[in-house]
Image (tube, grey):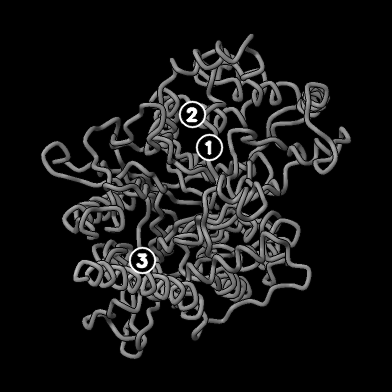
Amino acid sequence: MKKMKRILKVTLKTLAIFITAVVALVTLIVAVPFTAGIGLKTEALPADASVTLKRAAIGERYMLGLGRIADGLTRVPEDMPDVETYESEHFYPGGENAGEVWRLGYAQAVITPEDWETKTYYEGGNLVIPQRKLTDKLDELKVRVVALSASADGGVSIFAAVDSIGVTNKQVRQIRALVSDMGLLSVNIAATHVHTAVDPLGFYSKGGKADQDYIAFVNEKAAGAIREAVAAMEPGRLYMSQIGSVYPKEYSWQKIDAMIGFDTETDQWDDEWDEKYDARWEEIMSEMSAEEYGLGDYISSRRSFGGTESTRMNKLRFEPLNPGSKETVWLNFAAHPFRGGYAYGGWPADKISGDYIYYMEELIDESGANMIFVNGAVNGINPNDSQTADKSYYEYESDEEYYEARSKQPVDWKLRRMGRDFAAIALAMTMAPEEIAQNPLTDPDADHGYEYRRIVTMMQNKGTVTETELAPSLDIRLSEMRLDIENPLVHFVAKRGMLNMNLLRDGKSLAAVTEVGYMELGGAVTVALVPGEFTPGLAWRGGDSTKEFSIRQRDFAYPTFSESAGREVLVFGLCNDELGYIIPDNDHVMFYVPRGVANALLKTWDYDHYAELLSPSRNAAGVFADAFAELAGR
C-alpha cells in the first residue's frame, strides 16, 4: 500500500511538472507576440498579402517579443547623457568654396595593432561563437586620407577611409577633437567595412566591450594622417569618370528568362533551356559596352533579386599641376570586403587583412598614384570571387576539373587577384583601348581573372569612357540628427555598452546621435554621405524599394536620394557613423530564418532578412530620406 502511495505521489508530481511546463509553453506562445504588440506600431497587412508575408509577420511578432523581453531586463545606464541636456560637440555643418584651382593633399597611416602577436584582438564583422580571435596577419590595415578644397584661402574638407567594420559617430568625434585646432570645413570619416580588422564596437568581442586602447591608437593615427594630408595640399585638376549602371541589370537572369520564353511557374529547367540561355547570354555580352556593364558579374546581391546591385565604379582623379607630384585616385563602388573573414573550405578567417582593398592599392601604387577607397551602398552587395578564376565554369570539361582548379586558388590568392582586377579596371576604363594590352598592369593576358578579360574585351571593342574635368567648387552640407533605436535587440545590446555609440537616454528609450551629408563637386557630381550599410534602392529606386520586389508589397513612400538631388548620386556609405543596416520600410520584416528553412516555412526561395536584426529602426530609411531631401533643398 505504501509503495502504491509513493508511486501515485511521484506520478502526480511528474504530471504537475508536465502540466506546468505545458502552461509555461502556452503562456510563452501567447505572451511573446502580446508583449511585442504593447506600444509597438505595426503595419497592417494588405488584403492580398502573400503567404510569405503573412507567416513572416507572425514570426516578426515572436522575434520582437523575445527582443522586448530581453531588453526589459536591462536598464538604461544612469550615466548615459539625457536627450534634454545633450550638448553637441565636434560636429561640422560644412560650407562651400570655389576658386580657380583645386587643392588636394593625401596621406595614410598603418593601423595594424603593433602588439597583435602578444595581445588578444577580436575580429569585427562576423557573428560567431566563440568570438573569433585574430591570430595571424596577411597584410596591413590602413587609414587613408584626402584633404580637399576648391580655393587657396577656403576651408578644407577631410575625407578619411579607415580599414574597419565601422567607425561610430562617437569615434568620429573623438578623431575630430584631435584636429579641432585646424579650422577645417568638415571632417568626414568612413569605414571601408573590412571584416578582418579589429572589432571597434565590442559587439564581436568576448565580454562585449571595445578595446579602447586600440581605438585611441587608430584615432591618433587618423589625426596624424589628417595633418599630413593638409600639409601636403597642392594645386591641380580634378576629373570624374564612371562605368556601369545603378539601375536593374539588362542582363539579369529574370530578363534573360523572359527573352527566351522560360516561365518559372510552368516550365522545367533542362539542358535545352540551358543552351538557349547561354546563347542569349553570349549574344547580350557581345553587344554590351564596358560603360554599360561596369563591374558586371564581379558584383552580386544576396538581398534583392530585382537586379539593383550597382555595377557602377566611380573614379575621381586628381592631377597635380606639378608634373613631379603623384596623382591621387579616389575610387567608389559597393562591395563587401568580407571574403577574408569568411571561414569556408579550410580558410581559418583569423588573419588581419585589408581584404581586396589592400591589393587594389598595391596595383594603383605600382601605377605611380595614391589611392583612397570609399565603399558605396553596400547592404547585401558582395564581390563574387569566382570571377577571379583563370577560366569560367563553362570553359572546363567537367565539374571535377573546375573544382580541382579552384582548390589551387586559396582565399588569399583570390583577395589579391580581386583587388588587382578592380584596380586594373579603374585604370583601363579611361585609357585608349589600344593602350590597355600594352600596359603590364592592365594587360588582360597578365595576372587577371576571366571576368576582367571580358570587361577589357568590351573596352577594346566598344571603347572606354572619357573623363570630365570638374570646375573647382565644393559644397558640403551636413545635418546632425537623432534616430530613435526601435529595434529591441539593438536597444538591448546598446544598453549593455556593446556598440561604442553616441547614445542618449529618453526615459526608458534610446536615441542615436548621427549625421547625414550632401556634397556637390564642381556643380556636376552629387554625393550622399550616409551612416551605416545603405540599401541601393534608397539611392536610385528599384529592387526592394519597389512593390514588385518588397515583402510588404508596396513601394517605398519617400523620395530616393537621387530624386531629391535632381541627379544620380554617388553614395559614400558607412560615413560618419556605423548604424547597421538602413533598409526601406516596405521591405523591412524582423524575422530571420536561414534560406533552407524559409523555403519550407515561408514558401519562398528568395527570403533574406538577416539584416533587420542589426538595423536600428524600420523607420530609419524614411528619416534619412527626409533629412537628405532637406539638405539638397537648401
Kind of residue indicated by mark 3: Asn
The amino acid on which the numbered mark 2 sits, given as a three-letter code, is Met
Q: Disc 1 or disc 2, which is closer to the eye? A: 1
Position of residue 16 relative to residue 257, above or below, is: below
Task: Give the SS element for disc 3.
Answer: helix
Mark 2: few/some/many CA within 10 Å (<14, 14-19, 20+): many
- On screen, 174 above or below 245? below
Of the residues shown, which amino acid type is indicated by label 1? Pro
Write the residue at 25% across / 53% down: 205
Q: Which mark is residue 169?
A: 3
Rendered location of residue 68, percent (x, y) = 41, 75
Mark-to-mark CA distance, 3 and 2: 31 Å
Q: Looking at the image, which is closer to me, 507 or 529?
A: 507
Q: CA distance from mark 1 to mark 2?
A: 8 Å
Q: Is residue 493 left or right of residue 255?
A: left
Q: Are the two marked residues, 1 and 2, in contact with CB atoms closer than 8 angstroms?
A: yes
Which residue corresponds to mark 1? 383
